[in-house]
Image: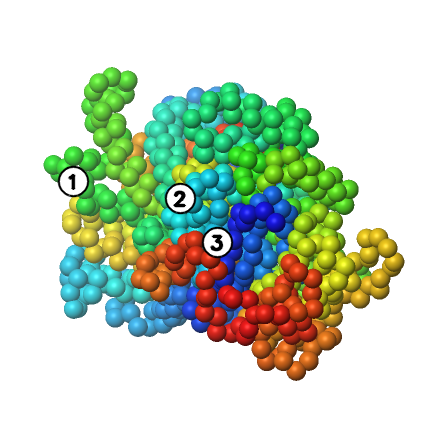
Amino acid sequence: MSDPVLEIRGLRVDYGLGDAAVHAVRDVDLTLHRGEVLGLAGESGSGKSTLAYGLTRLLPPPGVVSGGQVIYHPVDGPPVDVLTLTPAQLRQLRWAETSIVFQGAMNSLNPVHKVSTQLLDVIKAHEPTTTAAGRLARARDLLRLVGIAADRLDSYPHQLSGGMRQRVMIAMALALEPQVVIMDEPTTALDVVMQRQILGQLAELRERLGFAVLFITHDLSLLVEFSDRIAIMYGGRIVEEAPAAQLYRRALHPYTEGLLHSFPALRGPRRELTGIPGSPPDLRAMPEGCAFHPRCPKAFDPCEKKVPALGPPIDGDPGRDVACWLHPAAAPVPH
Amino acid sequence: MTISPSSIEQVIPGQGAMAQPSAAPGRAKRRQFRFIANAKAATGLVILGIYCLFAVIGPWVAPYNPDARSGDVLQAPSLRHWFGTTHLGQDIFSQILVGARSVMVVGLVAGVLATVLSILIGVTAGYIGGAADEGLSALSNVFLVIPALPLIIIVTSIVEQASDTLVALIIGCTSWAWGARVLRAQTLSLRRRDYVEAARATGERTWRIILFEILPNLTAIIASGFVGTVIFAVMSEITLAFIGISSISSWNWGTILFWAQGQQALAQGAWWWFVPAGLAIALLGTALALINFGIDEFVSPRLRSAGRTRIRTADGRTVRMRVGFTPVLAPTPSVPTPRAATTREDVVR
Amino acid sequence: MRFLLQRTAFYLFTAWAAITLNFFIPRLVPGDPVQSLISRNQGRISADAIESLRVLFGLDANENVWEQYLHYWGQLLHGDLGLSFTFFPAPVSTVIGDSLPWTVGLVGITTIISFLLGTALGVGAGWRRGSWVDGLLPATTFLSSIPYFWLGLVAIALFAGPGSFFPSSGGYEPGLVPAFDQYFIPSAIQHSILPAATILVSSMSGWILSMRNMMVTVSSEDYITVAHAKGLSERRVALSYAARNALLPNVSGFALSLGFIVGGTLLVEIVFSYPGLGYQLFQAVGAKDYPLMQGIFLIITISVLVANLLADVAYLLLDPRTRKS
């Protein structure tokens, strides 16, 4: 496995302060390696988007990051903790190193400015020495890269279709050739055909440009196809993390298993579609012990008392982690 | 004289994403009472309550007959005459107290009339749609664009010595358009909601849908429109009295200002003659505006003044909550340590 | 273009409605105001003028309402608004022509300045939530609740008076002849400062507040988060992304409330005896000069309609979504 490019350690994100705080992300450790696609899946309310906004410090009030580290490793130079940066430093790091493609393609573009204005201003902000003509040429190239005619630069967002808007957002995300692209449900608002097209294109672009992707979605079937590794989130914690193929073949956490059984098999024999009974936990009143135990078909004694730690299980393949009492950690991880 | 542009009113359809999310149906009831907990609204309601009280008891508690002349001509405020006296020796404090009733009655009557008209026209236009909507919308837009105050002045001046009731009716009939426009927009968006569609699909009667599905969700907007109209009505009534159009035989705060202006109170240095009436108007207007802020903030919680925007972190720094830069309360120092042990009380290894 | 045509059609319709309203109002006047005027000015009034007033008041018994209406329109299209009773025998159109520039100068300019200044302050207040500007909001609420005319009275009491730089009444130094010269212009400006400040103080807070609220609402839109994520400068996010979008509803709000605002500001003219339409209306009301009142109402309405159309054009330029390609 290649070097880490983004390391999240013990990240905690809350909404609100003090006793009223709702802990939406709890002690999350996650490492994104250079050039890989890491999928992050979970039901809505599992904290996956909060994690993404928290680590980029884009979470609006009353969100606060209450602890942890988010370490970014630039290609050259020492690693930096994103959480200790001043606004000015953060502004410099943003987009140049980590860019984001947001959930709502509809509302991500400023409705009153042309596509060109919005593509050019980010280049100008980070590379003020470039010439206007140079920036324009770059913007044209970017649009072509995502399969949009360069004359669309003069369009306003409302003149573009949903798919085109999301492509523009992807082009914009790649404008400064960042090391990390975070994608928060980038295709959810699109129809299935468009979804496939855009994802295919993304995979191709990643081959070519070599950026790492943190791909957040509630659709595990997408991740099985498109990502190298998958992390599953539940109740603000990572409950399982494994290479995509291994996870699909044999899920260790009952929750992962439930997710896998909520869509039809991609190939091979038909599986039974069961889904997961119950609904995601209320973050304000999390159950004791493992957050999943009230919905878990395999819950037993320790589940409702103690929170299982995430670590390599005794009975699993190497390179995978799980947080479940069914598969206790082989050797407790040293952290 | 202004109408306070409330954010609800600013929002009109066609501005898509900015359409106000109104309280989810069903939850509306439970939250109705929490509105009073809003500090601004509570302050406004208390002040308004005091004004209403004076409107009722004012004429009885007034120390003097507001018309009674006395030998104390143009006296500055004193213990005998709290707000001083006029050129005829009339007690200004009594005039203010007695005038409160006329102001409040005109404000409330005009407010109720305009609100009823705006509901009838706005909700009908929004719900029925089609040609009726076109016509009613055009009608309310016409009334909205025509300057209301000059129209009120002219209509009132034709009627000799217009009484309070008539003034209230004229104001009410000319100031419903704003509310109607906002209500139409909101009804239009409510009509497309699933629960209304569902009610229609199950064959519910139209009047039942409007009464039980639509109107409860318009409560905040109706209230805000009502308060806005009361402000406008009070200001208009006082203006009419000030320029001497409406009946000068009954007292309201505009009448006091009319006499003050007519008798050159300013030139004579009789500041007490016009200051109390103006402050009374301004305070009433502020109270009503505060109620409207409360309603606004109740409907769209984002508008609330950010409670605590500065937070002191554990290590003594002060960070600010703001969009785009999430504050970090306790960043773990020492950047490149390899997986250091962090304390996690609730995780069992 | 279609948007503008639609709006223009609507304003024409509104103008028609206002004119029709204006046609009916004098018919509610009790008695025969023209007859009393004629008897007061025995012999000094021309037959043409009497005829024109009779049309205005619908006193011609030989015509039915429809004929009267057509006749009224014919007269209006010739610019004949009747004779003013107060300024007899001056025609209403002349009186209005004399006072209109004063109102456009005072009310028009200050309303625009108030909107621009208030919007700019609102941008600041909305962007920096929880700063000291938020603390000022209650004070501005109080100021906006004060009737314009009362604030004018207080301003006169405090700042004007014998020996003060600020004159307490009039539009220019008595004795000067209105002309664009070095004597008249400074005097006119000197006379307009106090009324203009009065209008500004009490009308601005509404714009501050509505712009602040729009900024707060817009700040949580996705494209603002994207702008932050792009690492753009604070200034660019605040102005080009947030304020630029928050401005749109404020501009349409401005267009909608012009009618209210202009009505209120006209009263400031009364307090300052400023020679504009508001003061003229006040005098006409006092003298029961119905033709002048009607004429002023008509002119104010049409001015507001024109201002509305201009605001629509501004909106069109600001919002690409209304521009159909």
The C terminus of chain B appears in which quarter of the rendering? bottom right
Residue bearing the label numbered 1: C161
Q: Estimate the spatial distance between the alpha carbons at disc 1 and disc 3, rounded to whole Å.
A: 68 Å
* Image location (x, y in percent) of residue A60: 48, 54
Residue drawn at x 45%, y 34% as measured from the top left: A126
Sequence-first tag of 3 and 2:
3
Residue bearing the label numbered 3: A70
Q: Nearer the viewer, mark 1 or mark 3?
A: 3
Q: Of A20 and A223, which appears nearest the observer?
A: A223
Residue drawn at x 70%, y 51% as measured from the top left: A223
Secondary structure at numbered mark 2: helix
Contact flag, marks 3 and 2 (Cβ < 8 Å): no
Name the amino acid, label 3.
Val
Secondary structure at numbered mark 3: strand
Q: Of A73 and B118, which appears nearest the observer?
A: A73
* Image location (x, y in percent) of residue C64: 63, 33
Residue bearing the label numbered 2: A89
Residue found at the far bottom of this picture: A301
